[in-house]
Image: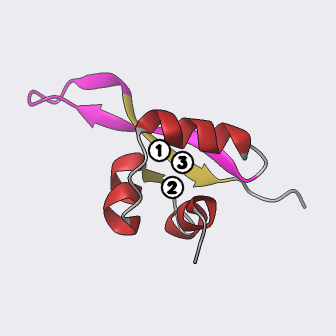
Amino acid sequence: MKSAVEKIAAAVEQRPHSFDHIRSTTRLELTDEQFVAMIEKNRGRFKLVHFVKRDDEGKQILPGRPGVRLRTPAV
């Protein structure tokens, strides 16, 4: 069985995703705070990102939707 870290890595292998997207595709039931803690614990592998979020009038809402991406390995 895959660990939560492995599930997150698989979910963002091709491109970054929001925590909401990862929850819906992996069935992980982590809170945003738990995602952040896991990402911070695995900083060598993951990076926190924020996606643009807009209200009904199209105005940007800050800080946006939290998400994660894989770090690019050093060459």
Question: Given the current orientation, which residue lies at the most extreme bottom position?
Answer: 1
Q: Quadrant of residue 74?
A: bottom right
Q: How is the image coloured?
A: secondary structure
Type of the residue with mark 2: Pro
Label 1 or label 2, whichever lies nearer to me, is: 1
Tag count = 3
Q: Earlier in the sequence, mark 1 or mark 2?
A: 2
Q: Which residue is mark 1?
A: 67
Image quadrant containing the C terminus? bottom right
**Disc 3 to disc 2: CB gap under 8 Å:** yes
Q: Is residue 55 magenta?
A: yes
Dot 3, how many residues are within 10 Å of its Cα: few (below 14), some (14-19), or many (20+)? many
Q: Which residue is mark 2?
A: 16
Instruction: Describe the element under mark 1 as helix, strand or loop.
Output: strand
**Disc 3 to disc 1: CB gap under 8 Å:** yes
Give the left or right position of residue 18, taking residue 34 as reference.
left
Q: Which residue is mark 3?
A: 68
Instruction: Describe the element under mark 2 as helix, strand or loop.
Output: loop
Depth check, front residue: 67 or 39? 39
Dot 1, how many residues are within 10 Å of its Cα: few (below 14), some (14-19), or many (20+)? many
Dot 2, how many residues are within 10 Å of its Cα: few (below 14), some (14-19), or many (20+)? many
Give the spatial CA distance, label 3 vs label 1.
4 Å
| The residue stretch that appears in magenta | 45-63
Type of the residue with mark 1: Gly
Type of the residue with mark 3: Val
Depth check, front residue: 55 or 45? 45
Q: Residue at x 52, y 43 (%)?
A: 35
Q: Quadrant of residue 21?
A: bottom left
